[in-house]
């Protein structure tokens, strides 16, 4: 039988009340932690927007609805792109009236004056053109040695597809955000002939095999870049023992773009890629602990401020209803960072190479004061898993302040890691539409070809031209044995 509280002594009652208060405090902290987990989305945590649930999408839609309406079409300052008038069209078709609108007299053959022009940009109907190559062998009049003409590069077997079909098929399979089967089906519809998945998948492997030299060259160029962006994102691979995670890594410097795939997120993958080991420039990255190993060899580090702003926004949302315990320091930190970004943009527009020292000191003072307040506010605040996340973030912002503010002293360093994160959206889209990869090897092939196409596009090279170059072969000559019958 449970003891009757009426019979307890004063000390026993105080002890029971203290125990109850401790349990309540622990439960409230656990509820706060669970509310934080439930409220995590792409606006306050490092998550892709595609992973947002219905509640997060509704919240984002509500924020968008409350904003002032954005004007349709191109925004002010956007150059825009449209069809450009050509002074020398490929074909000219004269359109004249058939009869007079006044008397009905026929006007066929009557010369007139051009008063209006319209140019139509279109492609001719897709139709396979079959070309037969006939290799000739010739006996030398002097030595009677018979020489056969070499088969043109890229031709094999009695029948094969030409470079344009191969390049278009490889483009659909590698950059069309579809599976190998869908790419083969679409090419079959366009060409009105069957295209096998084996042919399509073989093209992907063939292109990847030919890009070994490109990958080595782009890695060497990335290691020599003064500012390098690096990031990683999870993906899926369908193994025999079930779906497993793999990670797609991205490195970018100016117009150079590289993707890689590995089955782990550790130093084995980062070292194996051979880009970060030995790099001596400025690395723009998020705060993933795996990158910290390379910091000692770097000239500087710039943490992605977009990640920091999302984290600050998430901590601010931990405030109970009507309270501003967290926002009293997260909002000033966010304001200091965004004001610094605007000040750098203004200084860059005015041709300056550095911020005014007084402006920079004032911004840093606002940041340091707010971060110190965040540490003091959350030092003794309970959290089920240990330190309060507000304290952890504030302490990190204080310890890594030089890495947060690097963009204010070196204008070549951007505010965010977006140049590296934006290309990963295409990888996510490929995984969402085309499904998972069958192995890490096939994912690595896809990443290598995406690196090639992305870098080529950044240099103004058309993707089809780039793939045709990758699939081309050097010409050769095939000598035959002497024609004994003519000897």
Image (tube, rainbow, N blue to C red):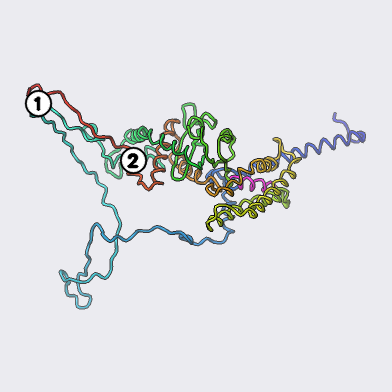
Quadrant showing the N terminus: top right
For residue 188, say whether it is visible.
yes
Secondary element under disc 2, as helix, strand or loop, is helix
- At which x and y percent is residue 382? 74, 39
Q: Which residue is mark 2?
A: 467
Task: Name the foreground residue: 68 vs 255.
Answer: 255
Task: Name the foreground residue: 235 vs 13.
Answer: 235
Secondary element under disc 1, as helix, strand or loop, is loop
Tell me where the magenta segment starts and ends, as one range.
306-318
Q: Which mark is residue 368?
A: none
Neighbourhood count class around disc 2 (C-alpha, 10 Å): few under 14, some 14–19, many 20 upward: many
Q: Are marks 1 and 2 in contact (CB under 8 Å)?
A: no
Q: Quadrant of residue 198?
A: top left
Q: Residue at x 79, y 37 (%)?
A: 22
Give the left or right position of residue 438, taking residue 284 as reference. left
Compared with 394, 149 (above or below) is above
Q: Which mark is residue 144?
A: 1
What secondary structure is the magenta-colored segment mainly? helix
For residue 35, say whether it is visible.
no
- At which x and y percent is residue 193? 27, 40
Compared with 33, 114 (above or below) is below
Q: Quadrant of residue 66?
A: bottom right
Give the left or right position of residue 100, taking residue 80 as reference. left
- At which x and y percent is residue 398? 67, 43
Q: Residue at x 68, y 41 (%)?
A: 395
Neighbourhood count class around disc 1 (C-alpha, 10 Å): few under 14, some 14–19, many 20 upward: some
């Amino acid at each position: 039988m449970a003891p009757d509280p009426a019979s307890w002594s004063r000390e026993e009652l105080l002890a029971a009340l203290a125990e109850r208060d401790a349990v309540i405090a622990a439960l409230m902290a656990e509820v706060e932690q669970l509310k934080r987990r439930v409220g995590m989305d792409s606006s306050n945590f490092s998550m892709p927007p595609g992973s947002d649930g219905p509640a997060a999408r509704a919240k984002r839609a509500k924020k968008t609805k409350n904003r002032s309406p954005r004007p349709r079409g191109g925004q002010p300052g956007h150059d825009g792109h449209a069809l450009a008038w050509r002074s020398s069209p490929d074909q000219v078709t004269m359109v004249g009236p058939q009869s007079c609108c006044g008397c009905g007299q026929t006007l066929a053959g009557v010369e007139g004056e051009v008063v209006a022009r319209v140019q139509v940009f279109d492609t001719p109907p897709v139709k396979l053109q079959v070309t037969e190559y006939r290799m000739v062998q010739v006996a030398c009049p002097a030595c009677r040695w018979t020489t056969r003409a070499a088969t043109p590069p890229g031709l094999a077997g009695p029948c094969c597809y030409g470079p344009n079909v191969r390049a278009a098929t490889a483009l659909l399979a590698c950059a069309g955000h579809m599976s190998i089967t869908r790419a083969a089906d679409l090419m079959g519809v366009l060409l009105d002939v069957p295209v096998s998945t084996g042919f399509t998948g073989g093209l992907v492997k063939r292109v990847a095999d030919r890009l070994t030299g490109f990958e080595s060259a782009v890695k060497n160029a990335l290691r020599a870049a003064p500012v390098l962006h690096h990031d990683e994102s999870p993906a899926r691979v369908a193994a025999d023992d079930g779906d497993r995670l793999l990670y797609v890594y991205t490195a970018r410097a100016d117009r150079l773009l590289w993707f890689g795939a590995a089955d782990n997120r550790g130093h084995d993958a980062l070292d194996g890629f051979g880009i970060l080991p030995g790099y001596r420039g400025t690395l723009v990255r998020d705060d993933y602990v795996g990158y910290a190993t390379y910091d000692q060899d770097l000239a500087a580090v710039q943490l992605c401020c977009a990640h920091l702003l999302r984290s600050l926004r998430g901590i601010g949302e931990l405030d109970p209803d009507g309270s501003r315990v967290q926002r009293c320091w997260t909002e000033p930190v966010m304001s200091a960072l965004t004001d610094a970004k605007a000040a750098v943009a203004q200084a860059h527009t005015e041709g300056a190479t550095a911020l005014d020292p007084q402006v920079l000191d004032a911004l840093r003072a606002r940041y340091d004061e707010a971060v110190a307040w965040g540490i003091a506010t959350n030092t003794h605040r309970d959290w089920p898993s240990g330190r309060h996340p507000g304290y952890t973030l504030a302490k990190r912002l204080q310890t890594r302040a030089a890495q947060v503010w690097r963009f204010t002293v070196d204008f070549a360093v951007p505010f965010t890691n977006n140049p590296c994160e934006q290309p990963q959206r295409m990888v996510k889209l490929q995984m969402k539409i085309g499904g998972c990869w069958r192995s890490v090897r096939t994912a690595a092939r896809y990443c290598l070809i995406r690196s090639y196409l992305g870098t080529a596009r950044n240099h103004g090279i058309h993707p089809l031209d780039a793939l045709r170059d990758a699939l081309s072969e050097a010409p050769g000559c095939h000598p035959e044995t002497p024609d004994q019958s003519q000897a």
